[in-house]
Amino acid sequence: MDQYEVIESALNHIENNLDQPLSLESVANTFNMSKFYFHRLFSAMMGCTLNNYILSRRLNASLQCIQTDHLPLTDIAYQLNFGTQSSFTRAFKRQYGMAPSSLRVSDMNISQTPMPSVVRRPIKNINGDIVTDFTLTEFDSIRVSGIAFEVDLATDDYKTKIRSHSLKLLNDIDKTVNGSCFVIYSNCQPNSSRFKVLFGIPFDIQINRPFYFTVDVPRLFCAKFKYSGDLLDIGDVLKTDYARFLKISRQEADDSHIELIQFFDDIHNLDLAYHIYAPIKRIPIDSD
């Protein structure tokens, strides 16, 4: 099996054994891998530690037990290997913002989350750690015209919001316009998940309507990542790949109001592979 198949198999193994003791060592041994290497590989591909992933899937499995079964919470905690009801309750409250007992007596319904798929991202090894593949490059200055809005990457509806604004721009420009487009994220405040966003094209278009702007993006030194799959999983990119890259490479983000730039080859097809440019601070070795 290649690395992706190992993690895909591991996800299935975990899902089928949530009622069993699961540890980093036991899962790694199932695939005849060093627990240290498996941990780095899993974290790079899934964006979280194995233990956190197992916890989230056990909590996800508990939803059906709570909402459809009549088992005592103590039995549910025991069946899903939480150890004690109190540890189960604490973890459940952190995940869902309410106690499992409150969910059982309320009219609220929390849907289960399907098992995630493994995005087949290229990866590389830096100093013994595994991260999503990247190159260091210059992003040339460019003029971009488009529509501006705000998104909160902590909420699921940011994907719908970006897609709706992209369609709005397409409806407002000349139908013959083809080529690349950009989603530019900027001005995120510390400890915030809210971003200003510009969805635009590299044309100097003039649309006399609210929230339409033309901006000059300066030349930037960036880490360039390539992705495929859901183009708008940008929140996960920020929390995992980019943050992990900065931690491992020790290259601080550059002093720029621009946080990330998504680049698409075809404005009419946003489901193809795309690139992300993340501004970083140039260090002396990068000039060698």
Image (cartoon, helix red, strand yellow):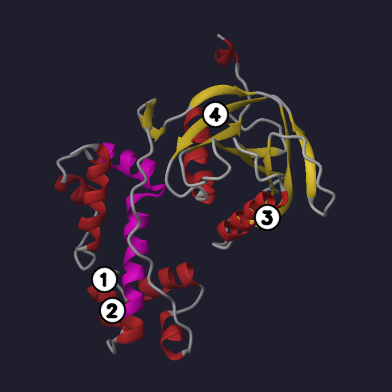
* Mark with earlier residue (3, 1): 1
- How far from the left and from the top, in percent, is residue 105? 44, 91
Is there a contact, CB below 8 Å, between mark 3 and mark 2? Answer: no
The answer to which quarter of the image holds residue 164 is: bottom right
Cα distance between the residues tagged 1 and 2:
6 Å
Q: Return the mark for residue 80.
A: 1
Q: What is the secondary structure assignment of the residue under circle 3?
A: helix
Disc 1 vs disc 2: Cβ atoms closer than 8 Å? yes
Measure the alpha-carbon separation of dots 3 and 1. Answer: 47 Å
Which SS class for mark 2?
helix
N-term mark: 4 or 1: 1
Upstream in the sequence, badge 2 or badge 4? 2
Q: Which residue is mark 2?
A: 76
Looking at the picture, how far across and down is residue 175, in whole percent? 66, 45
Question: Can you identify the residue that label 3 sits on?
Answer: 168
Amino acid at the residue labelled 2: Ile
Measuring 50% from the left and 35% from the top, which residue is drawn there?
247
- Residue assigned mark 4: 223
